[in-house]
Image (cartoon, coloured by chain):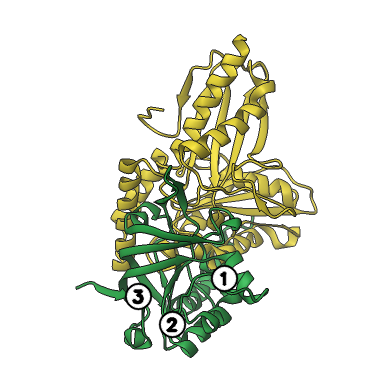
């Protein structure tokens, strides 16, 4: 059976989630990436959307503005989460966000932030932006539009948004950091094998 | 007047083609995805491959950009010296980028440096980026369009090694990119490696390398061997689709090289994500065209 999270999300909803679990989201999902993080953390500007108990998406979508001034979600996949590593721990603490969705892994600071404030990071498969757009029922608002299309905070109502693969859980586990150790161990062996065969300079 | 009409017509064609490649993957990439999906044994990786395939079907059916990051538009031009619109091509390609931005629609991805404002048109200083090669005596042009998305541009790296580090150093440089930023660049990747004389020549060649077909093999036997060893070696790391582990991490590794200074080995890596959006079109002197990268295209 599909596990579905609904916003607002409580710490309790996340307690049993473990890295590698697959979940889906119903409710409100706000896009939030580089400059929004920078404005909050470095310049102390208040986010124009309350995301306490909420979910953010590291994403910069393609949005079409219709003639009546409303918006249509065309394409919305995740962006590289690691770019927000610098800000995320403090961001979680300041905003009370519970679910961070993006692409690829995040680092030890975010993992610490998730553990301290009971939040999780999840991966939506990168590049799958049309699948994601079809789970957006409506765009309910747009803030900080001065940042341009990718960086605007788009407030989306979503249904069955996923698959979301938990990459950092509330217990501080980080699937990418665990995997990286394995990749690096294998790298030494692989490199040794290749090196023997590419001694072209003689 | 006749020239004006010709310019307009080619601008329209290239605008449509640029928008098109954001929605449908080139034939070689599509076939490679299907092949990797068949070979995969890791259940999570299989699920990811299936969402990827579902996404491409949906993009095709709904006629939308398959990934929201339609990149910075780059054109790699091989222009015949007698191509009739040689002098107009730069402005034609700028017009094509503006046109594609409307048709796609493409995301607005040109932020003017230092001004720090998104231009909203995908054009800006030196953007779309143009790379030129002249084909002496020919009257046609071959244009590669590439959507340089942020995720797969981030791992880009270039350095200059000392000869003592040898091709062993080249391999190490490539593997280090893969286990660091490569993880997050939406694997399975097409990895381009430039082996050359300096940082910028290697960088340019590494990008040219990912414009080659996925299954391309370098004509030089030793370069081909390194391509093969790197392909197998990176796959052995087990990074898998989306960096969440799996049997295959790359669609392939392509090397482009030049001669080098005896004291230097310039090496660079460019990566193309699984949604490797590139297209190749040949425009003849009479402006008839042939699309090489994608089969059965109606613009």
The C terminus of chain B - image quarter: top left
Residue identified by numbered label 1: A84
Q: Residues within 10 Å of mark 1 (few under 14, many from 20)?
A: many
Q: Is residue B176 visible?
A: no
Q: Residues within 10 Å of mark 3 (few under 14, many from 20)?
A: some
Q: Looking at this view, is B164 or A156 the one in front?
A: A156
N-terminal-most mark, 3 or 1: 3
N-terminal-most mark, 2 or 3: 3
Q: Is residue A106 visible?
A: yes
Q: Is residue B7 left or right of residue B288?
A: right
**Secondary structure of residue under mark 3:** loop
A89, above or below A78, in the image: below
B171, above or below B147, in the image: below
Residue A119 tag number: 2
Q: Position of residue B193 (x, y in %)?
A: 60, 51
**Secondary structure of residue under mark 1:** helix
Task: Please give the chain letter of the residue carrying mark 1.
Answer: A
Residue A7 tag number: 3
In the image, the chain rendered in green is A
Q: Looking at this view, is B172 or A131 the one in front?
A: A131
Task: Please give the chain letter of the residue carrying mark 3.
Answer: A
Q: Position of residue A184 (x, y in %)?
A: 53, 74
Q: Looking at this view, is B159 or A158 the one in front?
A: A158
Q: Which residue appears at 56% of the width and 25% of the height?
A: B11
The N terminus of chain B - image quarter: top right
In the image, the chain rendered in yellow is B
Please identify the residue farthest to the top as the structure is shown: B2
- Pointers 3 and 1 within a single chain: yes
Q: Position of residue B51 (x, y in %)?
A: 32, 57
The answer for how far apart the CA atoms under marks 3 and 1 are is 22 Å
The answer for how far apart the CA atoms under marks 2 and 1 are is 15 Å
**Secondary structure of residue under mark 2:** loop
């Amino acid at each position: 059976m599909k596990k579905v999270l609904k916003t607002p999300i409580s710490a309790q909803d996340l307690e049993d989630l473990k890295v590698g679990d697959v979940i889906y989201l119903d409710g409100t999902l706000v896009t939030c990436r580089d400059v929004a993080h920078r404005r909050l953390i470095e310049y102390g500007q208040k986010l124009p959307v309350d995301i306490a108990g909420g979910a953010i998406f590291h994403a910069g979508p393609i949005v079409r503005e219709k003639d009546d001034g409303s918006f249509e979600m065309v394409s919305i996949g995740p962006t590289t989460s690691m770019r927000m590593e610098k800000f995320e721990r403090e961001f979680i603490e300041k905003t009370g966000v519970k679910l961070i969705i993006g692409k690829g892994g995040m680092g030890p600071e975010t993992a610490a932030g998730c553990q301290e404030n009971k939040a999780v990071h999840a991966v939506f498969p990168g590049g799958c932006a049309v699948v994601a757009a079809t789970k957006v029922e409506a765009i309910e608002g747009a803030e900080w539009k001065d940042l341009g299309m990718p960086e605007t905070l788009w407030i989306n109502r979503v249904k069955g948004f996923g698959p979301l693969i938990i990459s950092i859980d509330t217990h501080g586990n980080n699937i990418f950091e665990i995997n990286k150790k394995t990749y690096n161990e294998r790298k030494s062996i692989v490199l040794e094998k290749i090196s023997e065969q590419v001694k072209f300079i003689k | 007047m006749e020239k004006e009409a010709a310019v307009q017509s080619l601008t329209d064609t290239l605008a449509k083609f640029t928008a098109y490649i954001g929605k449908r993957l080139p034939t070689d990439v599509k076939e490679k995805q299907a092949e990797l999906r068949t070979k995969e044994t890791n259940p999570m990786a299989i699920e990811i491959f299936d969402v990827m395939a579902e996404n491409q079907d949906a993009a095709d059916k709904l006629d939308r950009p398959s990934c929201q990051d339609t990149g910075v538009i780059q054109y790699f031009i091989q222009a015949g010296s007698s191509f009739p619109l040689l002098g107009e091509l730069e402005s034609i390609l700028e017009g094509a980028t503006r046109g594609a931005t409307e048709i796609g629609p493409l995301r607005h991805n040109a932020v003017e440096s230092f001004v720090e404002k998104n231009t909203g048109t995908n054009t800006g200083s030196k953007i779309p980026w143009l790379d030129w090669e002249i084909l002496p005596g020919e009257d046609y042009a071959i244009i590669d369009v590439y959507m340089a998305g942020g995720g797969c541009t981030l791992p880009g790296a270039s350095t200059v090694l000392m000869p003592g580090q040898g091709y062993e150093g080249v391999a190490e440089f490539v593997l280090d990119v893969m286990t660091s930023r490569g993880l997050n660049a939406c694997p399975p990747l097409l990895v381009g490696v430039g082996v050359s004389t300096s940082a910028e020549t290697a960088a340019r060649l590494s990008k040219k390398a990912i414009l080659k077909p996925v299954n391309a093999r370098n004509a030089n036997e030793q370069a081909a061997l390194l391509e093969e060893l790197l392909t197998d070696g990176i796959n052995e790391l087990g990074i898998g689709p989306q960096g969440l582990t799996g049997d295959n991490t790359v669609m392939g590794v392509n090397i482009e090289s030049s001669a080098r200074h005896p004291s230097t080995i310039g090496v660079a890596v460019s990566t193309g994500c699984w949604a490797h959006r590139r297209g190749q079109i040949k425009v003849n002197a009479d402006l008839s065209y042939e699309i090489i990268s994608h089969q059965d295209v109606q613009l």
